[in-house]
Amino acid sequence: MTKYIIRRLLYMIPVLLGVSLIIFILFKLVSGDPTAVLLGKNATAKQMADLREQLGLNKSLWLQYLDVVKSAFTFDFGYSWSTKQEISKMILQGAYPSLCLSVPAFVISTVLSLLISLVVAYYRGKGIDLFIRVFCIAGMSISALAYILFFQWFFAFKLGWFEISGFEAEFPFVISYIALPAIIWIVLSIGPDVRFFRTVILDEIYQDYVRTARAKGLPEVTILLRHVLRNALIPIITYVVIQIPSLILGALLLENFFSIPGLGGMTLNALNSSDFPVMKAMAILSSVGYIIFGLLSDILYTLADPRIKFN
Amino acid sequence: MKSNSLWKDAFYRLSKDKLALCALFIVVIYFLVAVMSGAGWIASSWSQEVGASNLAPSLDHLFGTDIFGRSVFQKLIRGTQVAMSVGVAAAVIAIPIGVILGALAGYFGGWVDDFVTWLYTTFSSVPNIMLLISITLILGKGIFSVYVALGATSWVNLCRLIRGEVMKHKEREYVQAAGAIGGGHFRKLFRHILPNVGHIIIINTSMQFQVAIKSEVILSYLGLGVQGEPSWGTMIDDAKLELVRGVWWQLAGATIAMFLILLAFNILGDALRDALDPKLKGK
């Protein structure tokens, strides 16, 4: 077991090097020689040479690649081109609004989806099961953009129940800004979540141990909660853990529409102003998150399920 | 008892599934519309004024007109062409890469497998949206970049699935038999194993198609997709400002157009999986 975890930890190294390589190649190709863009038309050759030195563009490609790898560990991403701020500071500032939105939304949507899928599994094959399945597939077939636009227009603009956009960090006020995007997040994730959870739960329901429990005379609800759910939780937990890094990035589109000054909005602003260092930083940060939580999810899976062999 | 081949059996099962047939019908219609629009037979004059600005839907203009007095219905048709072409292009790029890498990794194992596994783990570690945005930035805004970006992201899943399935098959008796009568690696892999894992390509493609359509709409909305042509994404972008003035038909049109094709692919994907891969039934 320990051996397995160590091997998985070591495997992070080549993956991280690979991710850095992809990001390095992509952004090397996009940015080209940024000095002309940064200094404007009237730059002297000396200014351009100085800036190139400062940005580390005179180093060999190999050393520039190592800088990318290093930033994945030190989180030192340099400075933004458009705001001239230190990127690691910008990320720290943006993390709070992002998490304000994503954490409650994620927790509520996961719990709600799990409850719905338990109900659906209990009434499997009956009308309510069919209804919720159709509802999920239909809900998943509507574009996220359409949900956001319609909800913002209807609930915030037309009915005035929520703030149309903006953000305030103070506790009671934050709710009026966060509630609507959080509701949209929940609506968006319920479809795929319920579909996955339902499948996992139904996979367990037809197992022999469930038949034994039923033969013993246990009530269906007890079987569902005490036997089935416990076994179904293994894939459900790994599914949930693997989504955690996306919370850091927040919801790109939601933050953009509701002008929440989080990391997702920051990424899109960087995209619109061709602020490559910020985009590169977000790409590295989110990839590192994916790698770490992917590993965590694998380890949890093996811990929870003793049937899995470590070879 | 007469036994049918997997494909015949799957076809029979699909033909009994009325819902799946409806979904297939919708998909075929969308493809036809896309091809006819691409050939210039319909909606070729989408950029011309057909009436006053921002007309509400009526019998003359089914989905109304946009701010320049252009027919929203014709724009939807052009958007269909864009969306379907993105799905096809992503599949055309992703299938050869995913199948060949996955098959080689699963069949040969060893360092080939290590390399391919590393490659797709690496690719899947960069969040898709960041990869999509970066690739479209490099290649310049436009539909071609969207094709490449989606192709580059959608081979990963297929490659993983094919690798796993080929690994299972390579030890089976029929492959050993093919080896015993003198078949080489190439023959065993491409003549014997691949036809037996081919259904995975079909199932996966029908799932990836809707991911491609959704991604195209978001990229176009962000201004990275088609330029100077209508797309469902740019229409939704327009609607962002129009909705406040009560002009809802561009949003409604684009949403309905997307809803029907995504719903059809969702249903078809499930039906294909049930029909072609009975072991996975219900998953």
Image (cartoon, coloured by chain):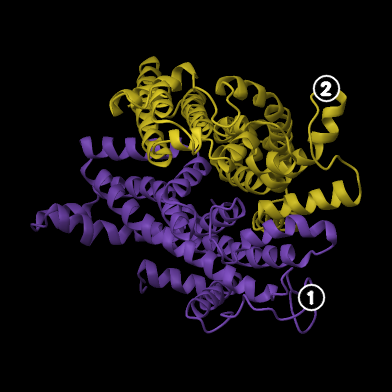
Chain colours: A yellow, B purple
Residue A211 in sight: yes
| Local secondary structure at mark 1 | loop
Q: Is residue B221 left or right of residue B53?
A: left
Front in this rendered view, residue A240 or A232: A240
Q: Is residue A296 left or right of residue B238?
A: left
Q: Amino acid at mark 2?
A: Glu
The answer to whether marks 2 and 1 sit on the same chain is no
| Local secondary structure at mark 2 | loop
Which image quadrant: the N terminus of chain B? bottom left
The residue that mark 2 highlights is: A170
Specify the farthest residue to the left.
B182
Residue at position x 72%, y 66% in the image:
B250
Q: Is residue B51 left or right of residue B119?
A: right
Kindly indicate the quadrant of the structure image that contains residue A80.
Answer: top right
Q: Is residue A142 left or right of residue A237?
A: right
Residue at position x 23%, y 39% in the image:
B112
Residue A280 higher or lower than A13, as above or below = below
Q: Amino acid at mark 1?
A: Pro
Front in this rendered view, residue A191 or A58: A58
Residue B250 higher or lower than B179, as above or below = below
Instruction: Give percent across and percent down for residue B255.
Output: 69, 62
Q: Chain of mark 1?
A: B
The residue that mark 1 highlights is: B57
Residue A8 in sight: no
Kindly indicate the quadrant of the structure image that contains residue A59.
Answer: top left
Instruction: Give percent across and percent down for residue A4.
Output: 37, 21
